[in-house]
Image (spheres, helix red, strand yellow):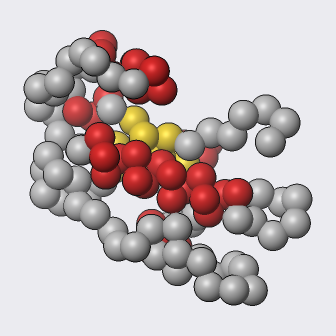
Amino acid sequence: MIRIGLLYRQAIQAYYEGSLGSARSYPAKLEDLLDDPRPLRKRRPLRRLYRDPITGGAWGLIREGGGTDTPIIGVFSLSTRRPMKTAGFPPELAGFEQAASYQQWRFIFQPTPGS
């Protein structure tokens, strides 16, 4: 799950950073990560859509500003199961150690200020 969640986060980052000009944007839907419709040359931040490995279904979507029609900034599992892994995360995922369920494992791309 960590590997796939990080793939989504990296794909969202690549989409965001691949924006034309200075106006950065996030994808409107996960399918935009398969074939970025914006650039002049074809770009595929993600090779295929992956199912949530815990539920076997769709991922929950984290949207900018929390709206239902706003761009996607991350994904999370819809599983309420307690995580098997509770320690030994890389620094960027250190918050996962306190998670009571997989739903709290959030794979979000947020640009650093000034980028």
Snapshot quadrant of residue 30? bottom left
Front position in the image: 59 or 67: 59
| Count of numbered circles on the image | 0
Q: Give left or right: position of 46 versus 14.
A: left
Q: Is residue 108 left or right of residue 51?
A: right
Name of the residue lying farthest toward the right? 22
> Can residue 61 be seen at all in this image of the molecule?
no
Across and down, in percent, residue 87 comes to 24, 15
In the rendered image, the vertical position of residue 52 relative to residue 85, given as above or below = below
Q: Nearer the viewer, residue 37 or 90?
A: 90
Query: In this orientation, which residue lies closer to the viewer: 60 or 7?
Result: 7
The quadrant of the image that shows the N terminus is: top left
- The residue at 31%/51% (across/down) is 4
In this view, 9 is above or below 26:
above
**Residue 17 sits above or below residue 33 on the image:** above
How far from the left and from the top, in percent, is residue 42? 62, 85
Residue 43, quarter of the rendered image: bottom right
Q: Position of residue 71 (x, y in %)?
A: 59, 57
Q: Can residue 100 be seen in this snapshot?
A: yes
State the residue at coordinates (11%, 26%): 84
Residue 104 in the figure: left or right of residue 45: left
Instruction: Look at the image and tell me in which quarter the C terminus lies.
Output: top right
Q: Is residue 49 left or right of residue 8?
A: left
What residue is drawn where x is 28% and y is 18%? 88
Residue visible at 33% across and 69% down in the picture? 49
